[in-house]
Amino acid sequence: MLKDKKIILGVTGGIAAYKAVEIASRLKKAGAVVRVVMTEEAKKFVTELTFREITGQPVTSDMWAEIQHYSVAHISLAEWADLVLVAPATANILAKADVGIADDFLSTMLLATKAIVVYSPAMNTNMFNHPATQGHIASLKAKGARIIEPASGVLACGAVGAGRLPEPVDVVEAVEKIFAVKQSLAGKKVLVTAGGTIEPLDPIRFIANHSSGRQGYAIAAEAAARGAEVVLVSGQAAVEPPVGLAKFVKVDTTRQMREAVLADFDDADIIIKAAAVADYRPKTVAANKIKKTDDDFVIELERNPDILKELGGLKKSNQVLVGFAAETQNLLQYAQSKLEKKNLDFIVANDVSKPGAGFQGDTNIIKILSRDGSVEELPLMTKRELSAIIMDRAEAKLK
Ligand code: CTP
């Protein structure tokens, strides 16, 4: 599984750095090409020489050293890798990677790489459980990084709890599992829309909706993880775009979303429209701030284009078109009519008035209605879990 895989092992300065030596050795024995990048602190625990001898490859740590093997070292190494494994990952590197601080070779490379990044945190239990560290871990995960959960037990500092670097054999197995995920969408293009479009009223106000972008972003992340070329067109969203996208287009209005979607529609294999699109826009947009008066204020709205309906008309037989329906009543009836009117392969319907479903939050409850009349009812799940099911169904229609 790891044969000829290009892996960067980032080693940071924790007592568990000695275990990274065995991790490097096991990765190499499994057939991977391993290049080690160490922080200055890591060198206080283990030597560069050890890693160089074990991997048979040069070891990098100094940002400014003259390195002959790479053109701009941290960039070319970042592009070279299939996967970056940071083990052990200290609280410091997790925080830096999360906020994007690039002040040494490893952190700079983490910012530059588009490879899968895996962190294996190891530190004192209190440091691991601190809200700051937990926050950085959650945020890195949301951006697409993988985390290998630390083991529990007696730590080097004498404390007992979570924070131990798992055994090297387990760390290597976790990496193998990541490569084992099926690249079922390799060579396919997936176009996803997410978030909410907004319509300005004047330079200060706009009409918006509650969409957080979470479900659409999770679908884009899932498609990217399956090897697809993913284009994500997003309105307003409360989350960061996932890693691994081919293209990310941020838009404000419905008309801008339409332009962006049409630009990438033609050669897309699967199109998933999870965005909450504004159906109306103010008829006039004031050039200057609208000042209040003592009278009531009436906004006249005009219709926006229905992007999905237009796509339904353009759709070719080899394209899979998926829509969303967020409703507060008559869910199945409304969803069924949208499925037909917009010429979709299937529609993902959710009753946003149910607890655990809808725009905000990490979970959703959905029903999938297909053209053959079938209705699949799914229980409450995380948006990422549902994304896997939605992509499975889309893939099945593709074949
Ligand atoms: N959609 C779109 N363009 C619009 C409106 C919606 O592409 N102008 C897409 C959404 O991304 C979603 C689906 O269509 O996939 C939602 O269907 P729609 O009938 O527009 O839902 P609502 O806007 O909620 O409409 P209604 O008022 O009919 O419930």
Image: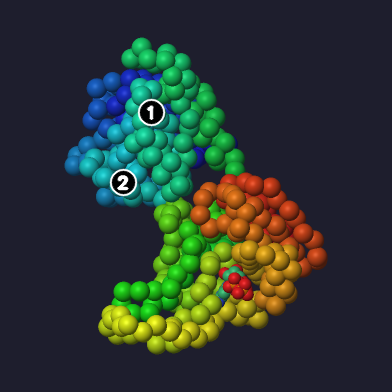
Q: Amino acid at mark 2?
A: Val
Which quarter of the frame holds ligand 1?
A: bottom right
Q: How crowded is the residue under tag 2: few (<14 C-alpha within 10 Å), some, or many (20+)?
A: few
Q: Quadrant of residue 132?
A: top left
The amino acid type, in three-letter code, at marker 1 is Phe
Q: Earlier in the sequence, mark 1 or mark 2?
A: 2
Whether residue 216 appears in this view of the structure is yes
Callout 1 secondary element: helix
Q: Is residue 339 visible?
A: no
Q: Position of residue 12 (x, y in %)?
A: 32, 30
The answer to whether marks 1 and 2 mark residues whose Cβ atoms lie closer than 8 Å is: no
Which one is in front, 220 or 108?
220
Q: Residue furthest front?
A: 294
Q: Please name whichever residue, 350 or 128, is drawn nearer the observer in this view of the structure.
A: 350
User: Whole-percent x and y of residue 269?
Assistant: 62, 66
What is the distance, in whole Å, between disc 1 and disc 2 at their CAs? 17 Å
Residue at horizontal 59 percent and vertical 43 percent from the top: 181
Q: Mark 1: few, some, or many residues within 10 Å (few <14, many ≥20)? A: many
Q: Which mark is residue 328?
A: none
Residue pointed to by mark 1? 128
- Relative to 230, residue 260 above or below: below
Secondary structure found at label 2: helix
Q: Residue at label 2?
A: 99
Q: Residue at x 33, y 32 (%)?
A: 91
Q: Is residue 65 left or right of residue 272?
A: left
| Position above or below: 21 against 225 | above
